[in-house]
Image (tube, coloured by chain):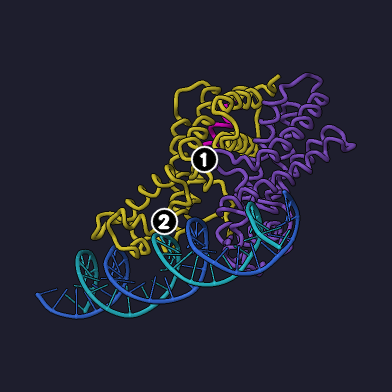
Chain colours: A yellow, B purple, C blue, D cyan
Amino acid sequence: MPDRPFRHGNLRQELLDRAEVVLRERGIEALSLRELARDAGVSHGAPRSHFPHRAALLDALVARGYERLADRAEALVHADLAPRERLLALGRAQLDFALRDAALADLMYAAKADGPSPAVEPGVQRLHAASSTVVATSLEMLRGERVDPLRTTLLMSSLTQGIAALIGSGRVPVELGEVLLADALDLFADGRLPG
Amino acid sequence: MPDRPFRHGNLRQELLDRAEVVLRERGIEALSLRELARDAGVSHGAPRSHFPHRAALLDALVARGYERLADRAEALVHADLAPRERLLALGRAQLDFALRDAALADLMYAAKADGPSPAVEPGVQRLHAASSTVVATSLEMLRGERVDPLRTTLLMSSLTQGIAALIGSGRVPVELGEVLLADALDLFADGRLPG
DNA sequence: CGGTGAGACTAGGCACTGTCTAGAATGGTG
DNA sequence: CACCATTCTAGACAGTGCCTAGTCTCACCG
């Protein structure tokens, strides 16, 4: 499973790029290895050299998704922002993702039959690490007290992910999602509930 | 699309029952209309009389899932429980569901390409209504102040759903899920963060 | 410099899927 | 009794994922 081109150029990357678009525009049911192969101008068996089965392609997409999210989170670690704005930006990144790449987000948060795939682990770790420092440091500045980084981060991530799922599924309009995100910040920062 | 038996007995119900099991035991990829038909002893075209396409079957499963969750939530409305225990039970119901029926939960929270299906709406409404009264009344008792029922409920549901997704995906062990649920209650009830 | 072996790809085939069609059986309603 | 919508059968079609055998290409090594 190399990551260097051979004959075609760089089939693996091209398949992933195209798959991402298909996933975004037509959903997971429309994602077919054979169609990807046709679009790339290779035979229907060619993808197999890079992805032994469909699930491997999906895993790679999920991994990329986490990497992208991790990039955004890491950028926020060193961004020159007030604590509250930093947290807001982190949450908004998740909402943006869920809106723009709803199908991919579903895949990322879906239950894997045989546990989480090892291929996505690095991205997950990076995302969690970056989120963790953003959440912990920001909240400690806002609250003036230490918080458990692991549990607080998981709590915050769960909440933003839940909101993202809510708007991603179209069950709640985007504007309300924004409001909920702000409410979430109030809750974490001041312990205040919308009322 | 009747809901009364004809020749077979009650094919529609039998298909749904069996589909639920398959979904639980082997995931969504293993769920095939033809296999369901074989298991039920009918021809491969028979399911079409009840579900015009596969997505309709999935929608019906999702609808049932919401109904089940709504039942549990409604039971809590009239349960003789202290506010905190009531909230805890509501959250735990969601966690239980995500653990026992991970694939179905994924389906329920996934982004539908063409908006939410009308068939699931009643269940969603019931669940939301019941959750809303549980959350609002419990929190107002705990906090001694009025809260916005809609936003607070959505906030709480998002958080528990996020935690459920976390443990359902195996990315976090079940025990930590329990801890996070308790942390979530502390946060909503007292505004306290784990630290 | 000439093998040689691993990886990338082709081409054919298989079992299976969802969906469509035409038609047969069934049972209630007029 | 005749009608007719509903349920179901049976066959077909395009499309899919996966497997296999074989071909091509290139890097590496004796």
- Kindly identify the residue that appears in the image at 48 percent across and 33 percent down: A96
**Alpha carbon distance from label 2 to label 1:** 20 Å
Spot occupied by residue A22 in the image (x, y as percentages of width and height): 40, 47
* Crowdedness near tag 2: few (<14), some (14–19) or many (≥20) residues, C-alpha within 10 Å: some
Q: How would you classify the magenta stretch by its main secondary structure?
A: helix
- Kindly identify the residue that appears in the image at 30 percent across and 55 percent down: A11
For the C terminus of chain A, the image quarter is top right
- Kindly identify the residue that appears in the image at 70 percent across and 38 percent down: B122
Q: Left of B142 or right of it: where is A166?
A: left
Q: Left of A159 or right of it: where is A96?
A: left
Spot occupied by residue A18 in the image (x, y as percentages of width and height): 35, 48
- Kindly identify the residue that appears in the image at 39 percent across and 44 percent down: A21
**Amino acid at circle 1:** Asp
**Amino acid at circle 2:** Ser
* Crowdedness near tag 1: few (<14), some (14–19) or many (≥20) residues, C-alpha within 10 Å: few
Where on the picture, by quarter, is residue A8? bottom left
Q: Provide the secondary structure element on which disc 1 rests.
A: loop
Residue that badge 1 annotates: B114
Q: Nearer the viewer, residue A141 or B71?
A: B71
Where on the picture, by quarter, is residue B45? bottom right
Residue that badge 2 annotates: A32
Question: Residue A170, labelled with which disc?
Answer: none
Q: Chain of mark 1?
A: B
Residue A133 drawn in magenta: yes
Boundaries of the magenta span: A131-140
Q: Left of A72 or right of it: where is B64?
A: right
Spot occupied by residue B174 in the image (x, y as percentages of width and height): 69, 50
